[in-house]
Image (spheres, rainbow, N blue to C red):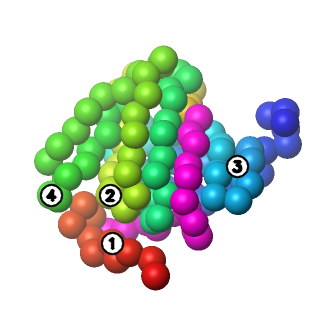
Amino acid sequence: MTQDQLVDGPMTPGQSRKKALEVGNLWVGECQVTAYDEPSQWHHHKEFDSVMYMLSGRIRVDFGATGQDAFEIGAGDYAYFPRRAIHRCQILEGKDVRYVFIRVGNGETLLNVDGPGAFAPAEG
């Protein structure tokens, strides 16, 4: 698949996603982070476990029951997000900040929420 064949994916304010592949319970794509002046919206990936690989730039990812926890990830780094883990990100450095991700799960891949303590029910 070439870059021009990617399809718009689910959006979060501050993050623009494109889908490359969806087969069975596998979802692969890329994201351009646009959250420069303030963090992206809080969100989670419902019933999907996700692995991301940073291509360029550096971001801070906030998470935890009250949003108090954070880690940084930059080009060449990987991160894992378990299903229903509420998080958000903000650019720390870079002009074209991108990562690729692989998700495994079922259903819709995104739910934007109001905050880190938002109720995130299991899909059933």
- How far, Cα to Cα, is label 3 from label 4? 30 Å
CB within 8 Å, label 4 to label 1: no
CA gap, disc 3 to disc 2?
A: 21 Å
Query: Is 11 colored magenta in this rendering?
Result: no
Q: Which residues are magenta?
A: 100-114
Q: Earlier in the sequence, mark 2 or mark 1?
A: 2
* Viewer-nearest residue: 95 or 105: 105
Mark 4: amino acid: Thr
The CA distance from mark 2 to mark 1 is 8 Å
Q: Earlier in the sequence, mark 3 or mark 2?
A: 3
Q: Position of residue 13 (x, y in %)?
A: 48, 55
User: For the residues marked 3 and 1, what is the alpha-carbon distance in whole angstroms?
Assistant: 24 Å
Q: Which residue is mark 1?
A: 120
| Circle 2 Cα neighbour tier, 10 Å, few/some/many (<14 / 14–19 / ≥20) | many
Please provide percent x and percent y for residue 112: 43, 65
Circle 2 residue: 86
Q: Is residue 108 magenta?
A: yes
The amino acid sitting under disc 3 is: Lys
Q: How dense is the environment of label 1, judged by Cα within 10 Å: few (below 14), some, or many (20 and up)?
A: some
